């Protein structure tokens, strides 16, 4: 096999048109780009539908011999020269090494096997769009849902129990809810779910799942520290799923002992100071097939998994598995939280808290890669938490608090105070930033985004009393963060002075991040023309691939609007602010600036399933689609639902070289995941070439057993004969959205046609 590599003089993303301008015709006889097709439309939409590097592209010519092979570059482009592929050649282009869980995207005739006769001008668009099911989301057709918090004991009928604890709103929401922005839609009252954080979404069933969180001043729901709840987005209602303690998973005791049922009365809730970040559930994540739930137990520092099925139902204790999270620290002070499923693996955030030594130089973040198949943890990325940051507040001594601090259960001394005549008390500002890695996302280029919560946001409130009441009240200010880690061809590099690989953020040289700047620079709140709070992000992240945006939970997300919480949206290109939405502002009974919203999820649907590919004439009867073997147009192909008695749900006629595609545009009912179907072709169709074709694939001359068993799925014939029909029986996958490798090879009869077939043997 001859290898031909096209060396590019760039490491940045370039469009195919720009690339080809610098190449002669001889250097680019056949070329194209492999890209992420996040919106599943069959076309690349730059700049966020990025090229995919490392895909192997192999060209076959004539009777099928390999001509050349190359690998896509960093921007997904590849090319073959005229020396490799002369004008007039009949070729087959194959794409392999597509990456974990990727398939060719829908709404396109360009699949992972393509056939061409090369014209004089060459071919410049032998492209391939790739997609994985969890890449797909149409943001403007989705909603965001997030927890919000109410002070007090949320027993039914109390004022603390009647306010919203879970809401949803449009993806592009902005402004202040009910003022110049939309009002969030109710999903659950505090009495139904209590305090929540971790969430995920089961797209096929349109059901969300949310887990309890332990935080000071906010009571738990009816299921306690181990509570997990489901959200039905059809009925916009929430229901208990399970207390995981009934599965044998100890999430710790409820620390709340003195909460008031009146949301306007703040109590000491002293035991929750220590319990925050140590008791209850942290992050949760569904498996790739959405049937197994993984959760981080803060109490024993283990990951647990259990089967919840489709749609989500109460799990059985027999399905529980547990995995001890390793300690990455030089001492025993490590605390996990955030968990993310990505390409079939899980990624877990752990912080070295230095809570025993109180030595801030020991603060460190670790991201583990966790393999759910073998239960193994591998350090994926580590980074110090010693960089200078922006001040949580610009007032008095608060402005001097510029670094993460070790975890502590001691309530901080106020860094500023003022007397509030309306309540007759001194109000102190409570600032004590303690790091937790609460969320992780992966951008279109594979870069990782880390969401950092400030633990103090779990330990404080708004005009709340201290754990030991000193007669004053306290406003707690968030001081979280959002960090970008560049994927440099598989080597991960923390942003440095606002630079993340080839991207330059808006905070270069602002003295507030790793290396003296920050990529996401607009994570501050402006009051009277100046930044009043400089680290308003608080750990919850959400990213829709292809949008170029990252959303984070935030304190005071809108300038000059105070005692608020909601979300802030940043550009993943330069870190600038795009829009902000306040779920509440100045509302009594909320937590004010103390982390008033939680994790974020979008109700993204599954991409439409697309199946098909090609009917061709197998001239040499070897079961392989050779480049010089023509596709057969004009053949009627039917699709049958075998789980519904074989009813026909689609019929079409092959075209464009024998291709056929079934999708939502030409079937009577939507194609479903994990369902049995049959593709059927009658071999006695009247008026078309098929009436002289009977034998499938090998034409009665089988290949050797080893050869038959090893025919590539991308280019072999998948059909068997049932009477007068050539059929392919198959089942759609649990999460892959398209199958473009279903092919039917037929051969001509020159004597008497007898419908007898010897098909490819399988083990």
Image: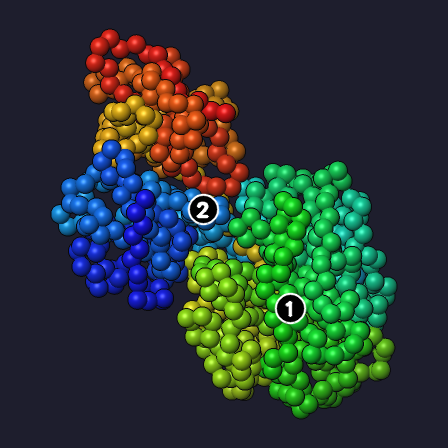
Sequence order check, earlier mark of 1 and 2: 2
Taking depth in this image into account, of 148 and 353 the one nearest to the observer is: 353
Q: In which quarter of the image is residue 19?
A: bottom left
Label 2 environment density (alpha carbons within 10 Å; few <14, some 14–19, many ≥20):
some
Image height of 109 relative to 303, above or below: above
Along the horizontal axis of the image, is 627 left or right of 595? Answer: left
Q: Residue furthest bottom?
A: 396
Q: Residue at x 24, y 18 (%)?
A: 748
Along the horizontal axis of the image, is 686 left or right of 149? Answer: left
Q: Residue at x 47, y 51 (%)?
A: 135
- Quadrant of the rendering where the N terminus is positioned: top left
The spot of residue 98 in percent (x, y) is 42, 47
Along the horizontal axis of the image, is 617 left or right of 501? Answer: left
Image height of 235 relative to 216, above or below: above
Circle 2: element type: loop
Along the horizontal axis of the image, is 221 left or right of 198? Answer: right
As drawn, the label of residue 365 is 1
Q: Can residue 516 be seen in this view?
A: yes
Image height of 466 relative to 755, above or below: below
Q: Residue at x 35, y 64 (%)?
A: 13
Taking depth in this image into account, of 125 and 314 the one nearest to the observer is: 125
Q: Which residue is drawn at 74% across and 73% down?
A: 354
The spot of residue 56 in percent (x, y) is 37, 48
The spot of residue 432 in percent (x, y) is 71, 79
**Residue under pointer 2:** 102
How many angstroms separate mark 1 from mark 2 (CA)?
30 Å
As drawn, the label of residue 758 is none
Q: In which quarter of the image is residue 5?
A: bottom left
Circle 1: element type: strand
Q: Is residue 649 visible?
A: no
């Amino acid at each position: 096999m001859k290898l031909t590599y096209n060396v590019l003089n760039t490491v940045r993303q370039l469009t195919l048109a720009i690339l080809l301008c610098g190449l002669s015709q001889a250097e680019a006889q056949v070329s194209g780009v492999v890209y992420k097709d996040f919106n599943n439309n069959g076309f690349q939409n730059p700049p966020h539908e990025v090229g995919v590097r490392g895909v192997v592209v192999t060209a076959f010519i004539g009777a099928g011999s390999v001509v050349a092979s190359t690998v896509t570059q960093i921007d997904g482009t590849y090319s073959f020269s005229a020396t490799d592929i002369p004008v007039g050649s009949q070729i087959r282009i194959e794409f392999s090494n597509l990456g974990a869980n990727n398939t060719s995207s829908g709404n396109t005739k360009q699949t992972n096997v393509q056939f061409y006769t090369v014209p004089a001008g060459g071919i410049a668009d032998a492209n391939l769009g790739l997609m994985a099911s969890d890449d797909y989301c149409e943001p403007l057709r989705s909603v965001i849902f997030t927890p919000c918090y109410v002070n007090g004991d949320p027993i039914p009928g109390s004022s603390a129990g009647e306010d919203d604890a879970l809401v949803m709103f449009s993806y592009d929401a902005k402004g202040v809810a009910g003022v110049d922005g939309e009002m969030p839609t109710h999903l659950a009252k505090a009495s139904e779910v209590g305090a929540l954080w971790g969430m995920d979404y089961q797209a096929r069933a349109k059901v969300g799942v949310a887990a309890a969180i332990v935080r000071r001043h906010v009571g738990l729901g009816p299921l306690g520290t181990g509570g997990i709840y489901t959200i039905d987005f059809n009925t916009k209602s929430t229901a208990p799923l399970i207390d995981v303690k009934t599965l044998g998973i100890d999430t710790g005791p409820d620390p709340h002992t003195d909460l008031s049922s009146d949301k306007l009365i703040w109590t000491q809730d002293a035991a929750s100071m220590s319990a925050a970040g140590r008791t209850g559930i942290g992050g949760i994540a569904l498996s790739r097939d959405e049937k197994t739930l993984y959760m981080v137990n803060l109490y024993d520092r283990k990951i647990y998994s259990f089967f919840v099925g489709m749609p989500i139902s109460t799990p059985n204790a027999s399905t529980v598995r547990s995995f001890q999270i390793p300690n990455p620290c030089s001492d025993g002070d490590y605390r996990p939280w955030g968990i993310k499923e990505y390409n079939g693996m899980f990624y877990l955030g752990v912080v070295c808290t230095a809570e025993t030594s109180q030595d801030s130089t020991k603060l460190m973040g670790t991201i583990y890669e966790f393999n759910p198949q073998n239960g193994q943890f591998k350090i994926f990325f580590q980074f110090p938490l010693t960089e200078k940051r922006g001040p949580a507040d610009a007032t008095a001594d608060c402005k001097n608090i510029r670094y993460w601090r070790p975890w502590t259960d001691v309530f901080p001394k106020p860094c500023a105070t003022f007397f509030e005549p309306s309540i007759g008390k001194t109000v102190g500002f409570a600032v004590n930033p303690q790091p937790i890695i609460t969320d992780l996302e992966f951008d279109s280029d594979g870069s990782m985004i880390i969401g950092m919560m400030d633990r103090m946001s779990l330990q404080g409130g708004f005009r709340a009393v201290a754990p030991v009441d000193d007669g004053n009240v306290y406003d707690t200010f968030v001081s979280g963060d959002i960090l970008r880690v560049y994927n440099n061809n598989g080597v991960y590099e923390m942003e440095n002075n606002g630079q993340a690989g080839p991207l330059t953020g808006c905070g270069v040289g602002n003295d507030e991040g790793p290396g003296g700047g920050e990529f996401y620079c607009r994570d501050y709140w402006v009051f009277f023309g100046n930044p009043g709070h400089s680290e308003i992000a608080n750990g919850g992240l959400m990213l829709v691939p292809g949008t170029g945006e990252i959303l984070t939970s935030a304190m005071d997300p809108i300038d000059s609007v105070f005692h608020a919480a909601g979300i802030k949206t940043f550009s993943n290109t330069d870190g600038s602010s795009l829009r902000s939405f306040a779920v509440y502002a100045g509302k009594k009974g909320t937590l004010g600036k103390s982390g008033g919203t939680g994790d974020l999820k979008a109700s993204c649907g599954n991409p439409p399933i697309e199946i098909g590919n090609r009917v061709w004439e197998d001239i040499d009867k070897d079961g392989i689609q050779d480049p010089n073997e023509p596709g057969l147009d004009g053949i009627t192909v039917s699709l049958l639902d075998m789980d519904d008695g074989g009813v026909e749900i689609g019929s079409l006629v092959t075209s464009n070289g024998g291709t056929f595609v079934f999708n939502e545009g030409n079937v009577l009912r939507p194609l479903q995941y994990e369902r049995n179907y049959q593709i059927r072709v009658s071999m006695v169709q009247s008026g078309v070439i098929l009436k002289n074709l009977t034998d499938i694939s090998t034409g009665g001359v089988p290949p050797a057993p080893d050869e038959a068993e090893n025919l590539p799925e991308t280019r072999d014939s998948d059909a068997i004969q049932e009477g007068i029909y050539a059929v392919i029986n198959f089942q759609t996958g649990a999460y892959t959205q398209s199958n473009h490798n279903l092919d039917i090879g037929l051969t001509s009869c020159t004597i008497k046609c007898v419908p007898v077939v010897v098909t490819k043997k399988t083990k």
